[in-house]
Image: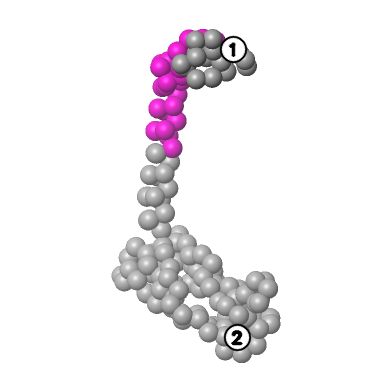
Amino acid sequence: MSPSRPDVPADVLAQRYGRRPRVGRPWYRRPGPLAAAAVGGALVLAYGGWLAVAQSQGPSYTEISHRVIDDRTAQIRFSVTRPAGTQVRCQVHALDSSSSEVGLVQVDVPASEETSVQESVQVRTTSRAVTVGVESCSAVEP
């Protein structure tokens, strides 16, 4: 099947299995599909930019440390960063060894001129916890 043999056609596979005839231009050379792809790409980029801006403006938290005090109590220290003058409510939960929630508390962080504050919270649990974490923080409307 080498091209040097004169008795073998150049396109053996096309003759054996057939070839679909090309009809028209490829999609990227037609204005309709090209415009649709461009608009779709622009929408995806705009949505990504909107997500980035929306998530960067809300309160954020950083867990500093946690410890299990006893079978019914756990403690966590965390930092909350938010715009000055914004009150924030955080959900703190304690989990046991099977990742089941054994304690939950809402922590209200009062509004202040400081953008970053630290909180220390004790969580009462129904059984021994192995970890404590901040589940979420959101701004509270006055």
Of the 4 image quadrants, the one containing the N terminus is top right
**Of helix, strand and loop, which one carries label 2?**
strand
- For label 2, the residue is 73
Residue at x-position 62% and y-position 16%: 17
Identify the amino acid type marked 2. Answer: Thr
In which quadrant of the rendered image does the C terminus lie?
Answer: bottom left
Start and end of the magenta stretch?
20-44
Compare marks 2 and 1 and give the one earlier in the sequence.
Answer: 1
Magenta stretch: helix, strand or loop mostly: helix
Q: How far apart are marks 2 and 1 (CA)?
A: 78 Å
Task: Depth check: give the residue in front, 124 or 22.
Answer: 22
In the rendered image, is residue 34 in sight? yes
In percent of width and height, residue 139 lies at 45, 61
Q: Position of residue 133 (x, y in %)?
A: 53, 73
Instruction: Evaluate if marks 2 and 1 touch, with contact meaning CB atoms under 8 Å apart.
Output: no
Where 109 falls versus 39 (above or below)? below
Which residue occupies 44% across, 27% down?
Answer: 37
Magenta includes 42?
yes
Q: Residue 15 carries which label?
A: 1
Q: In this view, does 116 lie to the left or right of 97?
A: left
Residue 41 on the magenta segment = yes
Question: Helix or strand or loop: what does disc 1 sit on?
Answer: helix
What is the x, y in percent for residue 138? 47, 62
- What is the three-letter code of the residue carrying label 1? Gln
